[in-house]
Image (spheres, grey):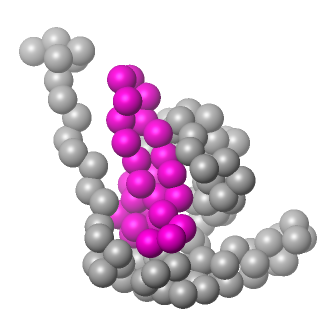
Amino acid sequence: MPRSQRRRAALFHPDPDQFDVLDVLHALSDPTRMTIVRTLRASPERACGTFPVDVAPSTLTHHFRVLREAGIIRQREEGTRRWTTLRESDLQERFPGLLEAVMSAYEEQSGRA
């Protein structure tokens, strides 16, 4: 079957009641993933290839998968592009204040506050 006719596997997005605090904290423990989250907080939706990170496409795909499976981002496909959004309200509902606390601590530690 030609590559253009292959379908990608469906993306897994856990429901908020399935979020695990340790998975969320693990996903937020990487500087590249924090850059992705920071970027999404400033820009609600972005195409996958437009994030300001300096990693190989396969590595970026890995980071998106970790964030998606932890419930931090949602991705949707539109044509040949994959669009990414932050699931901030879902995270706030499940773990009130967690994302803000982690982001604030990261910004302060990085001198970006």
113 vs 48: above or below: below
Residue 59 visible, this orientation: no
Q: Residue at x 75, y 78 (%)?
A: 104
Is residue 6 left or right of 109 when viewed as pictured? left
Is residue 61 left or right of 99 when viewed as pictured? left
Quarter of the picture containing the C terminus is bottom right
Q: Residue furthest left?
A: 1
Question: x%, y% of residue 41?
Answer: 66, 58
Q: Residue at x 48, y 63 (%)?
A: 87
81 vs 64: above or below: above
Residue 100 visible, this orientation: yes
Quarter of the picture containing the N terminus is top left
Q: How many marks?
A: 0
Q: Which residues are magenta?
A: 63-90
24 vs 73: above or below: below
The front one of 74 and 26 is 74
Name the image quarter holding residue 88.
bottom right
39 vs 54: above or below: below
Is residue 15 left or right of 111 when viewed as pictured? left
- The answer to if 73 sits in the magenta stretch is yes
Q: Residue at x 67, y 48 (%)?
A: 43
Question: x%, y% of residue 5?
Answer: 17, 17
Question: x%, y% of residue 112?
Answer: 87, 66
The front one of 76 and 64 is 76
Question: x%, y% of residue 71?
Answer: 40, 67
